[in-house]
Image: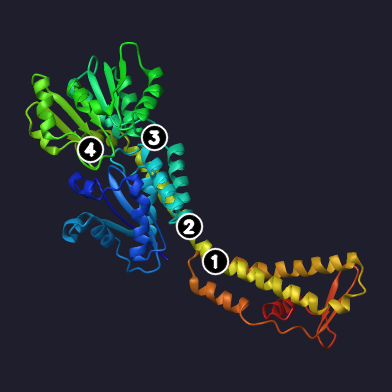
Amino acid sequence: MTLKLLGINHKTAPIELRERVAIPRERLAGAGLSLVEILGVSEAMILSTCNRVEILAAADSEDVDLAEFLHRHFAIDPAELRPHLYEYRDQEAVRHLFRVAASLDSMVVGEPQILGQVKDAYTVAREAGMVRTQLEPLLQSAFAAAKKVRSETEIGSTTVSIASIAVDLAQKIFGSLAGKKVFLVGAGKMSELAARHLIRSGVGTILVTNRTQARAAQMAERLVDALPRQSGLQVVPWEQLHEAASAADIVITSTGASEPIFRKEAGQAFLHKRKNRPMFFIDIAVPRDVDPEMNRLEGIFLYDIDDLQSVAAAHLAERTREAEDAEAMIAAEVERYQQKLKTVDAAPAIVGLQQRAEELRQAEMRRVQARLGGLTENQRAAVEALSRGLVNKFMHPPMQALKKAAREGDLARIEAIRETYMLGAGHGYSGRIEVGEESVRVEDVGGAALSAEDLAELMRKGRL
């Protein structure tokens, strides 16, 4: 199995290209199933956020071209897309996945949302049957590593996120948000985070809207207890989107719309109603909610998610030490996973060895059953216990050798042990087995008692 990870993110491509390959949550399963069908990969998961789109796949062949899927699925010229893609295989793919889940590859290092987004992508893929025996342990290890980073380092000690960066930008624009009216478009997690940061910043009034008004109302209910007396919170029907926007000083928008919901013509109408008072849009949606042409209007200032990178850089500088500690922890977790993966590779051989030994034990017990007919129940139990004990002792060295070979990645040694202990049928033992009250004596055809080494050799050859 070859593990592959292909992606495009805020470091490698501008938002103009990222929004063209963004996949809404409701389409993730369909896109993943198409990937499995078209390329023939055995398992897959697609992660699509405002800053990245990544494909994680378990493939039987190294020749699987994940980039080809993106070209075909989104009808984008390969020459336009390929320069912005990155691809990792096997251990490097594991490392990248762990870093992403731990928010070390995020625009805002340490932000907590990405782990939830990776888990959401996992849930979608798993429910669609695209995550099974190969990706399941990998993703569970990634979640555990991310949790360890957040609990054992200071990387997540402050509540920084894309939403908080957007509010920071709004504060830089106005100096103070006291008395300002902010319009939140969208009632998802990002909008709620932004609302909480706005409340802590002392904003005057918060307007909230969503295509499903019930969601906006539910979000408002969760926020009302945190709202100070001097601030107001109002839910606006979606039909009044533009009317409410024209009354706001700042519009922070984060919806899942596939097309802009604010276009240049609407911006001109806003300025007319506001008598040319300036208006600020902070668009943290991908695809973008605000037409870039709006930025050409005098009096409207538009910032998209890529414009937030300079503000995020200041937070990164503050977290350099924490990030270094987290990187070291991720490196250790990746190595641990790789060792576990190697050990898992030996599991079939270990199980097979145990099964082979047990089959031989039972076969020999059946073969000598007629000679044991006069035994009491206690004697039979003693024979059973003795035979099991012998098998366990004889099998212990090869099983330990298998585990050691797995840890060291020595596949040749694993195969050699498999051939030595697991091939060929048992030939039976022609010597004498004498059963006593508490013991069993095994003799050769000449009547001499066999040593432990002789017994081990017979077991190895499947004759005892």
Callout 2 amino acid: Arg
- Compared with residue 200, is residue 291 higher up or lower down, i.e. above or below? below
Distance in Å between CA atoms under marks 4 and 2 = 34 Å
Q: Tell whether label 3 touches label 1 (CB within 8 Å).
A: no
Callout 1 amino acid: Ala
What colour scheme does the image use? rainbow
Distance in Å between CA atoms under marks 3 and 4 = 21 Å
Label 4 vs 2, first from the N-terminus: 2
How many neighbours does mark 2 have within 10 angstroms: few (below 14), some (14-19), or many (20 or more)?
some
The residue lying toward the viewer, choosing from 305 and 158, is 305
Residue 346: image tag: 1
Callout 4 amino acid: Ile
Q: Tell whether label 4 touches label 3 (CB within 8 Å).
A: no
Q: Tell whether label 1 touches label 2 (CB within 8 Å).
A: no
Under tag 1, what secondary structure? helix
Q: Position of residue 129 (x, y in %)?
A: 45, 56
